[in-house]
Amino acid sequence: MDVSTLHAASEDFAAHLSEVTPGDMAQPVHGGGTVSGLVHYVLDETDVLSAAALRAATANPPEIDPVSEAEAAIATFGHLPESGYRRAAAVLILALSEVDASRFRCRYRVHVCTLVSATHRLAAALGLVVKADEELLHDVRGWADDTSTPAALTDLFDDTVVLLRSGTDAAY
C-alpha cells in the first residue's frame, strides 16, 4: 500500500508535537480534553491500526509488537512526546506498506484525517500556524470526490479539506 499521504500527515503532526513542552500538556484543546489527552488519543488510534495491519500484512507478520511499541512511546511521552509518536508512527507506516490497499483504504484515509484534525487542534492549543500541504490537500480532496467513498466518510474528507485549506484559524 502506498503510505506517502500517511507519512506526510504523520510528519506534520510530529513537527507540531516537537513544539510541546511539559507545561503544555495540560493546555486545553478544541473539542475538549488536553494536549496530553490528544496525543494519547493519536497514539491509541495509531496502535489500533498498526495491530490490525500487522495481523493482515502477511502470514508471518514482522516481529514487532504494536502494543509494546505504543507502551514504549507512552513511556517516552513524558519527556519526548515527538519521539514517542514517531516510534509508533514508524510501526504503522511499516505495517501498512505491507498490506493489500483494498482492505485498509477506508481506515487509512480516516487515520490521515484524524492526524490532520489532531495537528490543527494541537497547533491551535499551542498558538502555532499550520502551513498548507498541497499534496496532502490534493489527496484528501480526491478521496472526497471518489465515487467509491462511503457516504458517511465524504463529510469527514470534506471537513479535512477545509482544515487543510484554512490553517489554524478554521472554525471547528
Image (cartoon, grey):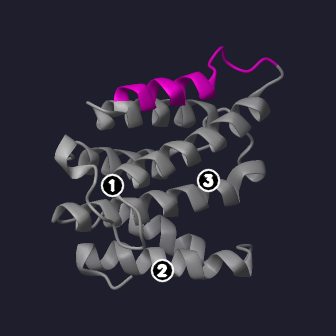
Q: Position of residue 123 (x, y in %)?
A: 25, 62
Is 73 colored magenta in this rendering?
Answer: yes
Along the viewing direction, whichever of 95 and 68 lies nearer the viewer: 68
Task: Determine which quarter of the picture holds residue 14.
Answer: top left
Tell me which label, 1 or 2, sits earlier in the chain: 1
Above or below 129: residue 172: below
What is the secondary structure assignment of the residue under circle 2? helix
Along the viewing direction, whichever of 141 and 13 lies nearer the viewer: 13
| Residue under the image location 65 percent in, 42 percent down | 48
Q: Amino acid at mark 1?
A: Val
Above or below 89: residue 123: below
Tell me which label, 3 or 1, sits earlier in the chain: 1
Q: Position of residue 112 (x, y in %)?
A: 51, 57
What is the secondary structure assignment of the residue under circle 3? helix
For marks 3 and 1, give the CA distance.
23 Å
Q: Position of residue 159 (x, y in %)?
A: 48, 80
* Residue tagged 2: 159
* Residue tagged 3: 108
* Bounds of the magenta segment: 60-76
Above or below 126: residue 77: above
Tell me which label, 3 or 2, sits earlier in the chain: 3
Q: Which mark is residue 35?
A: 1
Q: Quadrant of the C terminus?
A: bottom left
Q: Quadrant of the N terminus?
A: top right
Residues at marks 1 and 2 touching, judged by CB atoms closer than 8 Å: no
Question: Which callout, 1 or 2, points to the residue nearer the camera?
Answer: 1
Along the viewing direction, whichever of 46 and 10 lies nearer the viewer: 46
Task: Determine which quarter of the picture holds residue 136.
Answer: bottom left
Q: Amino acid at mark 3?
A: Tyr
For marks 3 and 2, give the CA distance.
16 Å
